[in-house]
Amino acid sequence: MAKIAFTCRDSAVPLAGGRTAADVNTGSTTIRIEVTDTRTERVPVLAPPPRRMPKPTVVRSSCFPNYRRAEELTERNLNKNKAAIEAWIKGPSPASDGDVKSFYDKVPSGETSGRSVSKQQVDPNDPLSGYKQGGLNAKAYDVSGVDTRIRYDSNRNPPFTVMTSMPSKT
């Protein structure tokens, strides 16, 4: 039987018995390939893919002034969007377990929901109005919207969980 020479990006590793191994990264899976003299000695073995965390993309950061206000505005948002939430749950294409949807509300005129810092400049004349340029010195500004994100869960009554709620621009 002929010997097989195998290299992959110069990462071939000699093994005992004339075998060669190479780790091949296919993008999502790393495969350890061992080439042998006979077909019965070894077969390719899949290695677990490397754990890659997605790079976070932060657009803005915001907070309610206190827990009571957060609870009050989240409940108000859910009540104002009751019909839209029910329509989302029932569908024409109903929500599936794990689906997430955002619902928005605006607080009454003259009130604020909290404060926010944006990544990009809010005021073109003030470089500190966004944290991309202002960094830790970026200025927070009042906002009057509420963004509440809920996740569908058929095992609950009502069939959703509030994932997060935050002050927003609109």
Image (cartoon, grey):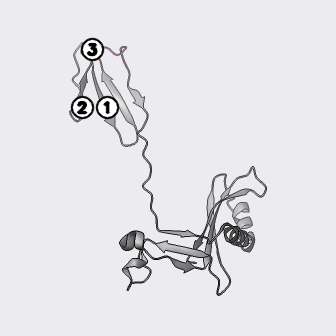
Q: In this view, does 66 lie above or below 30?
A: below
Say what secondary structure mark 3 lies in: helix
Q: Is residue 130 above or below residue 56?
A: below
The quarter of the displayed image where residue 12 is located: top left
Q: How far apart are marks 2 and 1 (CA)?
A: 7 Å
Q: Residue at x 37, y 14 (%)?
A: 40
Q: Does the magenta stretch include residue 96?
A: no
The one nearer the camera, 137 or 89, is 137
Q: Quadrant of the C terminus?
A: bottom right
The amino acid type of the residue labelled 3 equals: Ala
The quarter of the displayed image where residue 164 is located: bottom right
The amino acid type of the residue labelled 1 equals: Asp
The one nearer the camera, 58 or 142, is 142
Horizontally, residue 121 falls left or right of residue 75, namely: left
Q: Position of residue 162 (x, y in %)?
A: 67, 60
User: Which numbered dot is residue 16?
Assistant: 3
Q: Is residue 38 magenta?
A: yes
Q: In this view, does 122 lie above or below 152?
A: below
Q: Position of residue 112 (x, y in %)?
A: 62, 80
State the predominant SS element of the stretch in magenta: loop
Say what secondary structure mark 2 lies in: loop
User: Which numbered dot is residue 159?
Assistant: none
- Which residue bears the numbered disc 2? 11
The amino acid type of the residue labelled 2 equals: Ser
Instruction: Report the magenta residues as a range.
Output: 36-42
Q: Which residue is drawn at 22% across and 15% down?
A: 2
Q: Residue at x 67, y 66 (%)?
A: 67
Q: In which quarter of the image is the N terminus?
A: top left
Horizontally, residue 135 falls left or right of residue 143, namely: left
Q: Do the residues labelled 2 and 1 touch (CB within 8 Å)?
A: yes
- Which residue bears the numbered disc 1? 23
Horizontally, residue 109 falls left or right of residue 31, namely: right
